[in-house]
Structure formats: structure tokens, C-alpha cells
């Protein structure tokens, strides 16, 4: 899967999306350190160990670099940035039962706006799976020759 480049200075807004999700009872917020093991365990159960490892790093970062989607104390999704590399977005995932509601888009945009607020002009989406989603949502473009990129030689 290739890496993708995003212009952070040209991002779409997200307030209406976040407000719409909130009206449905879905809250998008940063994970709290006391939730680390619960969130990391959920990521491992629903996705894989490697993503769980990156999520652990994101929640241990100061400040925390992991957003989560929560409905009635149930975790629906997560998104991380600044984990394996600085200025990288990912991993991210939404529970199968919660897909199609805009949660993934909201998590992505919250993370990208956080990177913009840190002073970055561009961000990298590492090992982007759904490239069409990223192109449509934030104008990301594939970085040619970026596979396997930073993940080369990984166990």
C-alpha cells in the first residue's frame, strides 16, 4: 500500500460533521491515558497487533495523538497520528457495524487538523489502504515509489 501526501493548508472543515455525529450520540474526542489498555485491546481485537502497538504509542504521546469515536461508552473507531513517524497519519479504523456514518471521515479530519495546528503544511498518510477515500475526503495524492516505505523490513 502506498503512502499519500495531504496539503494541510487546504483541508475541508469538519464542524458540521462532528455536530451531526454528536446529535446521533456519537462523540469524537481524544483518548485519555486511563483508557489506553481498553482502546489498545479493542484495536487489537478488531484489527491487528501492529495497529494496537501504534495506538499504544499514540495514547502514550504527550499530548495524546489518538482520537476515538464513542457511543454510549462503546468504542466505534479510532485514528492516530505521530506514531511510527512524525507528521504521519494512521492507523485508523471503524467497527464494521458503525461504517457508513461518517465516523472515519471525522476521525481523519480531526487528526489532520491537529497536525496542521502543530505547524505542518503537509502530512503523510502511511500505508494508505483506501486511497480513493483519502483522495475524496482530503485531496490526498499517492506518493510514487512509497511502497513499502517506512515499513520495509518490519517483522
Image (cartoon, helix red, strand yellow):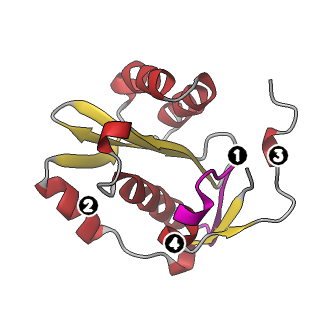
- Decide whether residue 122 is among the magenta residues: yes
Whether residue 66 is visible, yes or no, is: no
- Lower sequence index among marks 1 and 3: 1
Q: CA distance from mark 2 to mark 3?
A: 33 Å
Q: CA distance from mark 2 to mark 4?
A: 18 Å
Looking at the image, the residue that sits furthest to the bottom is 10
Q: Which residue is mark 2?
A: 18
Residue 4 is situated, as x and y percent measured from the top left of the image, at 69, 62
Which secondary structure lies at badge 2? Answer: helix
Q: Name the disc covering residue 148, or none.
A: 3
Above or below for 74 versus 127: above
Residue 140 is situated, as x and y percent measured from the top left of the image, at 61, 70
Question: Mark 1 touching mark 4, by CB under 8 A?
Answer: no
- Lower sequence index among marks 2 and 4: 2
Above or below for 136 versus 88: below
Question: Mark 2 touching mark 3, by CB under 8 A?
Answer: no
Q: Point out the stretch of residues depicted in magenta.
A: 120-133
- Lower sequence index among marks 2 and 1: 2
- Lower sequence index among marks 1 and 4: 1
Q: Which residue is mark 4?
A: 136
Residue 128 is situated, as x and y percent measured from the top left of the image, at 65, 53
Amino acid at each position: 500500500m502506498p503512502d499519500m501526501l495531504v496539503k494541510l493548508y487546504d483541508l475541508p472543515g469538519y464542524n458540521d460533521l462532528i455536530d451531526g455525529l454528536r446529535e446521533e450520540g456519537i462523540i469524537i474526542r481524544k483518548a485519555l491515558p486511563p483508557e489506553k489498555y481498553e482502546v489498545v485491546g479493542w484495536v487489537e481485537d478488531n484489527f491487528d497487533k501492529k495497529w494496537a502497538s501504534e495506538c499504544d504509542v499514540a495514547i502514550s504521546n504527550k499530548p495524546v495523538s489518538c482520537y476515538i469515536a464513542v457511543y454510549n461508552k462503546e468504542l466505534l473507531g479510532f485514528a492516530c497520528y505521530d506514531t511510527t513517524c512524525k507528521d504521519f497519519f494512521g492507523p485508523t479504523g471503524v467497527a464494521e457495524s458503525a461504517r457508513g456514518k461518517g465516523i472515519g471521515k471525522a476521525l481523519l479530519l480531526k487528526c489532520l487538523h491537529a497536525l496542521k495546528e502543530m505547524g505542518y503544511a503537509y502530512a503523510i498518510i502511511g500505508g494508505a489502504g483506501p486511497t480513493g477515500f483519502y483522495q475524496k475526503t482530503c485531496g490526498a495524492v499517492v506518493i510514487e515509489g512509497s511502497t513499502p516505505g517506512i515499513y520495509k523490513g518490519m517483522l
